[in-house]
Image: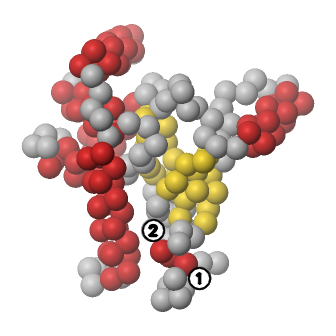
Amino acid sequence: MLVGISNHQLRQSLSLAVTVEKCIAEVALPTSSSLARIHGQLEVGLHQGGRRLTPQRRRVLDLFESIGSGIHLSAEEVHRQLLEANSKVSLATIYRTLRLLVEMGFLHELEISDGGHRFELASHDHPDHHHLVCVRCGRTEEFESKPVLEAGRSAAERIGFQLIESTLNVRALCPSCQRPSTTNVH
């Protein structure tokens, strides 16, 4: 057992890593023209804020573009993927870059139950979606619900807010974590 990590947690983390690897391998790579367009948008946004498009920022965005929407990665998973691709970038740089890409609207951030965060590519085709998040292993699945979207619109309209986004994060236990060998979460 690693310090502070049970064998079950380690198995769950390895299982999640394999799942992410499979998803990444199955997704078609974006075209060079779509990457050029996104890089251009990022470069303009950074320039307006007095920043520049560094190779590290480009690589982080390229990773999310290559896996597409619907895949949720932690900062540590992004770091590992980039190191495996021989990109030398520190974990601190990954955290700063993810925060910046969220602020600029290129990524969405999902807070999970253990205080961790996962990130996904922002998609204009799929803006109002929701997440089932396993409180034990962090597995994240997306779903859509028109009633949730309508409830958000209705509440915003009734109170005088302008709706920007309507999302719901549902905390649950995935099928693997519901097995009898695990203890219940309170």
Residue 120 visible, this orientation: yes
At x 43%, y 28%, the residue is 106
Query: Does 32 sit above or below residue 134?
Result: above
Q: Nearer the viewer, residue 138 or 179?
A: 179
Query: Does 10 sit above or below residue 39?
Result: below
Secondary structure under tag 1 reads loop
Q: Nearer the viewer, residue 177 or 79?
A: 177
Name the residue tied to disc 2.
137
- What is the quadrant of residue 27 in the picture? top left
Residue 8 in percent (x, y) is at 38, 81
Could you say which disc has been placed on residue 95 in the image? Answer: none
At x 32%, y 75%, the residue is 10
- For the residues labelled 2 and 1, the Cα–Cα distance comes to 13 Å
Residue 71 in percent (x, y) is at 41, 46
Q: Would you call the spot at circle 2 few (<14 residues within 10 Å), some (14-19), or many (20 or more)?
A: many
Image quarter where the C terminus lies is bottom right
Residue type beneath disc 2: Cys
- What is the quadrant of residue 49 in the picture? top left
Secondary structure under tag 2 reads loop
At x 27%, y 32%, the residue is 29
Query: Does 96 sit above or below residue 78?
Result: above
Q: Would you call the spot at circle 1 few (<14 residues within 10 Å), some (14-19), or many (20 or more)?
A: few
Q: In the displayed image of the protein, which residue is found farthest to the right?
A: 158
Name the residue tied to disc 1.
184
Left or right: residue 109 compared with residue 19: right
Q: Earlier in the sequence, mark 2 or mark 1?
A: 2
Residue 126 in percent (x, y) is at 55, 32
Left or right: residue 32 compared with residue 123: left
Residue type beneath disc 1: Asn
Left or right: residue 126 compared with residue 84: right
Residue 103 visible, this orientation: no
